[in-house]
Amino acid sequence: MKKQTVLWILMGLFPALLFGQYTEQGNFIIGTTLGFSSAHSKVTQEDGAADIATENPVSTQLSISPSMGYFLVDHLALGLGMDYTFNRVERNEGDTNKDSDLLFGPFVRYYVPVAQDMAFFLEGNFGFGNASDNLVLGSEVQRINTNIMAMGVGPGFTIFSGSAIGIEALLKYNYARSKFDTDIGGVQRQTISRTNQFDFSIGLQYYIGGVEPARSPSPRHY
């Protein structure tokens, strides 16, 4: 009877033990995700006294996000990521603008196992960076430098293979704020964009076993 009880306990723990090999303390995670999203934004121009113009553009975005993290404790990883995005924006007047952004920042991810080769996870990230774009304002073409701040959070699901590769899907809510200044006929204006969007992405992650600490060299005998 005792042997059967121990056997059932071991069978129940086996998924967690196998899962822990991928996400245990000291391991690394390296990979990338590909994403697609569509968003509605509110853009307001300010001249220092009051809002003078507001529009609601629609944007389509493609992104690639390589990252590298380290498991500080079992199932909890902290790391750095890069987001490269390509945006296509359709404005109220029918104009279309295309640009690309590059962001860097930290991320945190926590895993919850549901089977020996599957797990849910929750990810949060923060990014900052800038973008450059040529914008037509009236009859003038201006080079615009935009400061960007973004953050996101959402759940994901991953399936582990025997070769330590995780195939994952991630749904995140993202908030972004960007700001740039323009000069139209000697009048300085500031444009602020606030974007709320849901982003669905798929990706591959590679889980690497922890690196052993260096050993002190053996004493030399001369």
Image: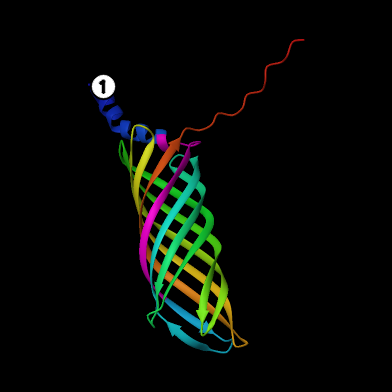
Report the side of 167 relative to 72 (left or right). Answer: left
Identity of the amino acid at label 1? Lys
Residue that sits furthest to the top in the current view: 222
Residue at screen point 58% across, 77% down: 181
Considering every residue shown, the one lying at the far right of the view is 222
Q: Along the line of sight, which residue is nearer the eye, 142 or 36?
A: 142
Residue 92 is left or right of residue 135, and the answer is left
Q: Main secondary structure of the magenta part?
A: strand
Residue name at image x 57 percent, y 89 percent: 49
- Residue at 48% across, 48% down: 67
How many circles with numbers are drawn on the protein?
1
Question: Residue 44: x percent and y percent?
Answer: 48, 81
Location of mark 1 (residue) = 2
Image: magenta residue range: 22-41
**Rendering coords of residue 206 (x, y %):** 42, 39
Q: Position of residue 198 (x, y in %)?
A: 36, 63
Q: In the figure, 220 relative to 42: above or below?
A: above
Instruction: Verify whether residue 31 appears in magenta.
Output: yes
Residue drawn 37% across the image and 80% down it: 94
Report whether 89 appears left or right of 69: left
Q: Quadrant of the N terminus?
A: top left
When the figure is inspected, residue 20 is found, relative to residue 65, above or below; the finding is above
Q: Nearer the viewer, residue 9 or 50?
A: 50
Which colour assignment does the render follow?
Answer: rainbow
